[in-house]
Amino acid sequence: MSFVSYGSFVSIASSAVRHLALLALLLTFVGNAPAAPPSVPNAPAATAPPTSAPADVDSLLDALDRRGKELKDFSATVKLKTIDLISGDDNTQNGTVYFQSDADRGGKVRVNFASKTSSDGITQKKPIDYVLVNEWLWERDYSKKTQIKHQVLKPGEKANLLKLGEGAFPLPIGQDKADVHREFIVTQLKVAKDDPADTVHLSLVPRPDQPSARRLAKLDIWIETKTSMPVRIDTLAPNKESVQSTSLTDLKINTGLPPDTFALPELPPGWSTQTESLQP
């Protein structure tokens, strides 16, 4: 079973599909690893690979490594907020996310957004389903009555969702801390007043000579100390003009999911459908 770069996933996808890629990676945070240690004062930013990382940072990375290897299934309420740092406008998609691990194919993901809230506080129903199973990603928009079926992998290929330098939103999950330090400058920051309560805040800045530097400018992760769960992840775009902030609540871990969780119902008449296959 060969691995394929997740870049092929991103190359055919819209921004909404890239959101799904981020959410798929978020799911790997959780598990039954020991709780993360409490936060410490802000560490000075590094400009070159450190000779040794602070013990508290390495403890967090070790916990994230274990956590990514213990996840069986996951569900949560999700809010995905996109902020335009130039205009100040933002919008938030509200919904539910489900994940189930799959040793052979890497995992199944379903993200069901039910509504969208604009910066003026107006919420509209915007039902959209994204389902990633095996080599296919279904993008179903109920308002527009359209469905696009994307082939994101070739038959027999397996996406390495966690591989640093390959994912659209690489995260230090299920990976050795040495690989994380090679790709990012990692610091633990003091949690600010308005940040999620009882969390540890990690900042990951891609090193200039690493692939992640082309995909993001900065990644901020807040991990709840009591449960060792991520409750927020902010991704700053490479041009530093926008931020995607993902918040997860009502987390349920390794409780089992109904068999039909990832099954979409049959389409009613009148819908527009499209299939986008990978080139041979």
Image: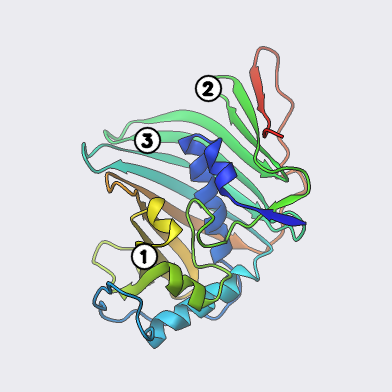
Circle 1 packing at 10 Å, graded few (<14), some (14-19), many (20+), is many
Q: Which residue is mark 3?
A: 117
Q: CA distance from mark 2 to mark 1?
A: 42 Å
Disc 3 marks a residue whose amino acid type is: Thr
Q: Which residue is mark 1?
A: 207
Residue 201 visible in rendering: no
Q: Residue at x 50, y 59 (%)?
A: 165
Q: CA distance from mark 3 to mark 1?
A: 35 Å
Asked if labels 1 and 3 touch by Cβ distance under 8 angstroms, the answer is no
Horizontal relation, residue 222 to residue 28: left or right = left
Quadrant of residue 192 within the rendered picture = bottom left
Residue 218 visible in rendering: yes
Question: Is 101 drawn above or below residue 147 in the view shown?
Answer: below
Q: Could you tell me which quadrant the C terminus lies in? A: top right
**Which badge, 2 or 3, is on the more N-terminal residue?**
3
Q: Nearer the viewer, mark 3 or mark 1?
A: 1
Q: Residue at x 36, y 65 (%)?
A: 207
Question: Is 266 drawn above or below residue 26 in the view shown?
Answer: above
Disc 1 marks a residue whose amino acid type is: Arg
Q: Residue at x 57, y 25 (%)?
A: 142
Horizontal relation, residue 140 to residue 19: left or right = right
Residues 57 and 177: in front is: 177
